[in-house]
Image (cartoon, helix red, strand yellow):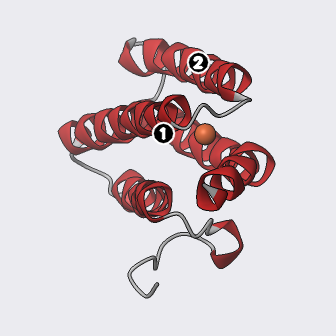
Amino acid sequence: MDKLKFIPKSLIMEHELIDFDHNNLFSLFDKVSKIIKKKENIDELDNIIEELVNYTSVHFENEEKLMSTANYPYFKQHRLKHKMMLAHVHGYLVRFNSENESKRNIAVDINDFIKSWLEIHIEMEDMYLGNYLNKL
Ligand SMILES: [Fe+2]
């Protein structure tokens, strides 16, 4: 799986679609970090944060479709984790879109939050899902 070059090896689940999404998310974390370091171009920052949040949400929908189709026994609990996470991200976005705080600092928080949440979530929840799907 050479093309999975952004995701840490220990987080690869050997499930093609989910690994593909996770790898794209890790690639986005890198992109966001690079854009945050640039001094100018707030528009670019807006766009990349929007892309990161949208991709996270689309990825959750993709996983939820797989779980639903496969009658995954922990579907409801897993979906609840996704929902709670997105609610948390929404809180960050409210701050990101307000004029009161530094956009760059909140972008760092959003990126760090999604990245560390995802790392734990893959280890704690997605791995079980991957094992289940791979046994079907
Ligand atoms: Fe998940």
Q: Which of the pair 135/120 is nearer the observer? A: 135
Name the residue at 64% across, 55% down: 130
Q: CA distance from mark 1 to mark 2?
A: 16 Å
The number of discs equals: 2
Percent from the top left, x then y, of residue 122?
A: 68, 51
Element marked by disc 2 = helix
Q: Is residue 46 left or right of residue 104?
A: left
Query: Would you call the spot at circle 1 few (<14 residues within 10 Å), some (14-19), or many (20 or more)?
Result: some
**Of pointers 1 and 2, the one earlier in the residue sequence:** 1
Percent from the top left, x then y, of residue 134?
A: 61, 61
Q: In this rendering, is residue 65 above or below 44?
A: above
Percent from the top left, x then y, of residue 39?
A: 32, 53
Name the residue at 60% across, 54% down: 136
Residue extending farthest to the bottom is 2
Percent from the top left, x then y, of residue 20?
A: 41, 62
Residue extending farthest to the right is 124
Q: What number is the disc on residue 66?
A: 1
Q: Which of the pair 125/117 is nearer the observer? A: 125
Instruction: Respond yes or no on whether mark 2 lies under 8 Å from ligand 1.
Output: no
Q: In this rendering, is residue 58 above or below 92?
A: below
Q: In this rendering, is residue 38 above or below 129?
A: below
Image quarter where ligand 1 lies:
top right
Q: Which of the pair 19/51 is nearer the observer? A: 19
Q: Amino acid at mark 1?
A: Leu
Name the residue at 60% across, 31% down: 71
Name the residue at 40% across, 51% down: 36
Residue where numbered disc 2 is placed? 83
Q: Amino acid at mark 2?
A: Lys
Q: In this rendering, is residue 26 above or below 94?
A: below
Q: What number is the disc on residue 4?
A: none
Q: Is residue 57 left or right of residue 133?
A: left
Query: Would you call the spot at circle 2 few (<14 residues within 10 Å), some (14-19), or many (20 or more)?
Result: some
